[in-house]
């Protein structure tokens, strides 16, 4: 049975939404990308796996490719789209509560902005380094997202996940150690592992002080980043061995403001490639390829993408 035929046959037993040939440009911050063969947005009830049971069965019976989509903040889907199943996790694992003093349990689909609003209200200190990172907590864990103030690994204590390919949906617990993360990577999630939730450490502080700190960081972000245009955030990881930030490499190459089609290295922050309105994935990839080749040829620096490119 084909993937589409499977979901057509089981549509009535699926709580969430099922879409065929769904434009992925509507599901990513970049507003770029072709169609997904099948796009599902699962739901659950009473804290169970809900629609994940059916997704698990679909993958095992059809052998289809799968892509697990959070908020789509660090992704570039190709113009040809995705042949297979895209699972959009926006309605699963949305809990956010205090497990115990100093520890929050945060569902993978909770947005970083939601977490920070709660931090401001309740005085959860020590999470300010996540300010300005778009996307979901699950995505931040998967890529060890961070800013110049710190990375997810600084707060992450434990992660629970489930694998969509294994014979049964069994929950795994991962306790964090120094080897659990590296720069923009995790080393404990297997292919097709889906993050359920994570435990984050915090310290109790005056809510007013937490709010002031986070508001100031948001203000700086708006001043220094091109937040008025669709983008994926930072395109390249910082080439630490060079002693330079990625934006400094782009500037040394004279590429700040350089444009291909409707994709442009932003004038405001040159490690952002923005969508000026009608950019295609091919335009963005051409800018990425240009910067990488010139950085290597002219500066001897190897640039690596931070954005995840999905073909």
Image (cartoon, helix red, strand yellow):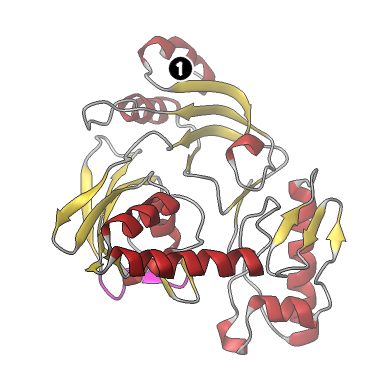
Residue depicted at x 76% and y 64%: 266
**Residue at left offset 80%, top offset 52%:** 283
Res. 145 visible in picture: no
Observer-nearest residue: 72 or 175? Answer: 72
Q: Nearer the viewer, residue 163 or 233?
A: 233
Residue 59 or residue 32, whichever sits in front? 32
Tell me which segment is drawn in magenta: 177-184
Furthest residue toward bottom: 243
Q: Is residue 148 above or below residue 156?
A: below
For residue 213, side relative to residue 237 (left or right) = left
Residue 54 left/right relative to 6: left
Question: Residue 120 falls in which quadrant of the image?
Answer: bottom left
Residue 40, how many percent across, how many down?
Answer: 48, 27
For residue 125, say whether it is visible.
yes
Residue 183: in magenta span? yes
Task: Please give the name of the residue rendered at 77% of the width and 73% of the height, measured from the top-left corner.
Answer: 293
Secondary structure mostly seen in magenta is loop
Residue 25 in picture, x, y percent from top left: 66, 38
- Residue 305 position by quadrant: bottom right
Q: Which residue is mark 1?
A: 6
Across and down, in percent, residue 227 comes to 65, 57
Could you say which is closer to the camera, residue 304 or residue 27?
A: 27
């Amino acid at each position: 049975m084909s993937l589409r035929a499977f979901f057509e046959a089981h549509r009535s037993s699926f709580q969430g939404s099922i879409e065929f040939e769904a434009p992925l440009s509507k599901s990513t911050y970049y507003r770029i990308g072709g169609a997904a063969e099948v796009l599902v947005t699962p739901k659950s009830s009473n804290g169970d796996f809900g629609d994940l049971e059916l997704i698990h069965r679909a993958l095992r019976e059809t052998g289809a490719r799968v892509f697990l989509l959070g908020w789509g903040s660090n992704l570039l889907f190709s113009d040809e789209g995705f042949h297979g199943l895209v699972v959009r996790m926006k309605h699963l694992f949305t809990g956010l509560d205090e497990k115990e003093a100093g520890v929050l349990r945060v569902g993978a689909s909770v947005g970083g902005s939601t977490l920070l609003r709660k931090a401001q209200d309740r005085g959860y200190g020590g999470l300010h380094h996540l300010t300005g990172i778009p996307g979901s907590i699950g995505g931040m864990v998967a890529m060890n997202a961070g800013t110049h103030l710190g990375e997810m690994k600084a707060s992450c204590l434990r992660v629970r996940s489930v694998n969509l390919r294994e014979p049964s949906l069994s929950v795994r617990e991962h306790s964090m150690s120094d080897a659990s993360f590296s720069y923009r990577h995790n080393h404990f999630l297997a292919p097709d592992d889906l993050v359920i939730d994570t435990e984050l450490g915090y310290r109790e502080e005056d809510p007013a002080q937490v709010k002031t700190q986070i508001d100031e960081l948001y203000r700086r972000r708006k001043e220094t980043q091109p937040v008025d245009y669709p983008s994926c955030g930072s395109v390249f990881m910082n080439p630490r061995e060079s002693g330079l930030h990625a934006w400094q490499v782009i500037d040394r190459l004279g590429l700040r403001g350089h444009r291909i089609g409707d994709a442009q290295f932003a004038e405001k922050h040159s490690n952002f490639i923005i969508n000026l309105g009608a950019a295609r994935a091919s335009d963005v990839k051409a800018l990425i390829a240009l910067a990488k080749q010139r950085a290597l040829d002219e500066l001897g620096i190897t640039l690596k993408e931070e954005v995840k490119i999905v073909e």
